[in-house]
Image (cartoon, rainbow, N blue to C red):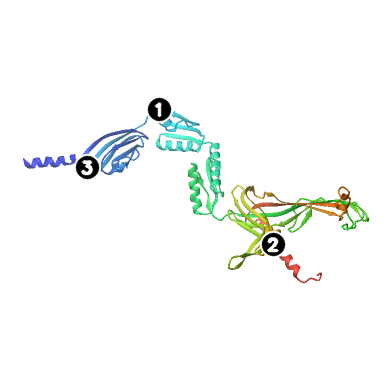
Amino acid sequence: MRPLVLLLLLAAAPAFAQAEGGTISLGVGQQKVIQVSNVARVAIGEPDVADVKQVGGGNELLITGVGEGRTSLLVWRHNETRISYLVVVRKQDPKEVVSEVRSLLGDREGIRIRIVGDRVYLDGETITTDDYERVQQVTALYPSVKSFVRPSANAKRLAAEALNRAYQKNNLRGVEAKVVGSTLFLEGWVDSQDDLKKLDMVTKAVGEHAESLVTVGVKKMVLVEVDFVEVSFNDNKLVGIKPPLHIQSTEGSGATVQIVRAIPGLDSGQTQNLGSVSATLGATTDFSIGARFDYGFVRVLSQPKLVCASGEKAEFVAGGEIPLLIVTQNQFAVEFKKFGIVLHVTPTADRSGNIGTEIYAEVSDVDRALSIRANGFEVPGFRLRDVKTNVTVKDGETVILSGLFNYNEDKEVSKVPLLGHIPIIGELFKSRNFVDSKTELAIYVTPHIVVPGSDRVKELIQDARKLYKDAGDSVSFSIFD
């Protein structure tokens, strides 16, 4: 009897190690979570019917309906017990799918949902790229839903404009977003891998997805041509009767008028009259009645040409240094103060041919009239005119900085001693000289994007070689010296 009882117990032992978990029913594309504690491993019979994943720290199973059919799910626990489930995946009611998809899409415009047979289709055009990405996410959840939705061209264009504004704001001017067909591309260059990471962060912050063709490479080169032009206006009026002690003999009378052309074409150091009008009434007598009016000229102070990498600073200094004596309690020291023309430019070029340029220009000169005396030493004064700005222009366009004025007024009275002091009658024995001097500094800045071997670079090289040759010829022997 005992052997029979033992045999029955051994036959019943596997029944204690295995349990039936029941039936799990779901539709295609649906997901369900079941609670199972101490899960060691799982296995699914037909992966084309259902998929299973462990979640919740190993105490939950996520089951997804993949295709119509039936399959078995086996779950092993850490105590070697096993649970068996029957998974039945049925076709989901299309109306039910439409209801779920509509709730996920919300009130997004331009998207239509249709039922054809037992399938659900999406078509139309999305207004924004965010809406298009939402459609892609929904169709990934429902295999029975097919999408024919496409992003509108206007949505991609607006996305590209938003990205380009963000890149400009974050100093990524070498990158440009473009739309090709229905795809958003990023083209251009960045300076380093750090800038490439920054580009990716900015793109994600805007909320757009784009195919990147951006490279990490050499910066563009920018040529900056600058003209420092000084315009002087001299209004010199001599009115009255000049006494014979001051008169300079003149003959006849006359008038001259000169008209100048535009500023471009002047070489450095050249001057040209803006215009003058003069008239002298007089004779070879002892007294003369005169009236003279003079009007100024233009001269080019300097014409530097600077080449630098995009985003880098270029500096130009033309002038000199004046020694200043620094007196302390125990010693003397000499400090040199620079004066002349100082130019700092920082051009930054983008893919569209725009060049943003930071400009600082300064023109200074020593003015003895402004000097002071300290501890028995004369300290000279300086006249300074400077400008600082940031502008953006197209390749080859010129920025004109002007309005830096210097204005002086003087009056000189010449008269015969004693006679010139008599009221009313004294006007016959005196003359007045009015001198009004106004100087304006104008700065012309023209940036160009250049590449090695371009026509502009070749022209500059040829000009430099010609200048070098002319300088050598001027100091060499010649029979025409």
Q: Position of residue 443 (x, y in %)?
A: 69, 52
Q: Position of residue 389 (x, y in %)?
A: 63, 49
- Given residues 413 and 359, the one toward you in this image is 413
Q: Which residue is mark 3?
A: 81
Q: Which residue is mark 1?
A: 95
SS at mark 1?
helix
Visible residue check, residue 208:
no
Question: Which residue is the extreme one toward the top?
Answer: 95
Measure the C-alpha gap from mark 1 to mark 2.
80 Å
* Residue 480, quarter of picture: bottom right
Q: In the rendered structure, which disc, 1 or 2, sits on the residue that comes first in sequence?
A: 1
SS at mark 2?
helix
- Disc 2 residue type (three-letter): Ala
Q: Are marks 2 and 3 in contact (CB under 8 Å)?
A: no
SS at mark 3?
loop
Q: Which mark is residue 389?
A: none
Q: From the viewer's perspective, is 293 left or right of 446?
A: right
Crowding at mark 2 (Cα within 10 Å: few <14, some 14-19, many 20+): few
Q: Which residue is mark 2?
A: 464
